[in-house]
Amino acid sequence: MYKQSSVHSSAGTAHGSSRSYLVGFIVSVLLTLIPFALVMYPTLPRTVTAWLVVALGAVQIIAHLKFFLHLDTASEQRWNLIALIFSAVIILLLVGLSLWIMDSIHHNMLAH
C-alpha cells in the first residue's frame, strides 16, 4: 500500500518520512490559522489574545524543530540540541537585559 521511507544523512540519522513532513505541515498551518483567527475575530480580551498568540508561536517553533529539523533527544542530536539551547539562552539574555536597560533609562529620564 503506502511505504514509509526515511532518508538518512551521512551521520546516520533519519530525516523523516513524507508522512512526518505532512503531519508537520498540517500542524504548522493550524498553529498559524488559530492565532490569525483570534486576531481577525476578536472575542477574547487583548492581553489574553496576545498571550495565546505568543504561546502558539512557541508551540509552532517546537513543531518546526521536531518535524522539519528533526531535532530530538537522540544521542546523535545531542550536540545540536545543546547548541540550540545555548543560542536560546544567549538570545533571551540579550533581549531581556536590553529591555531591562531601556526600562531603567526610561525611569531615570522621567525622574529628572
Image (spheres, rainbow, N blue to C red):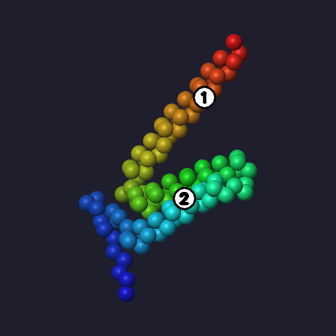
Where is residue 75, by image quadrant?
bottom left
Residue labelled with disc 2:
32
Q: Is residue 85 visible?
A: yes
* Front disc: 2 or 1: 2
Q: Is residue 74 visible?
A: no
Q: Is residue 22 left or right of residue 96?
A: left
Between residue 87 and residue 74, name the one nearer to us: 87
Q: Which residue, given by chain and number where applicable, does mark 1 sit on?
A: 100
Image height check: is 77 above or below 86? below
Above-or-below relation of 75 to 83: below
| Front-lying residue, 70 or 25 | 25
Q: Amino acid at mark 1?
A: Trp
* In-front residue for pair 12/68: 68
Farthest front residue in view:
40
View extreme (top): residue: 112
Tally of numbered tags: 2
Residue furthest left in the image:
10
Under mark 2, the amino acid is Thr
Q: Nearer the viewer, residue 51 or 63?
A: 51
Percent position of residue 101, x then y: 58, 25
Residue in the image at 37% along x and 87% along y:
1
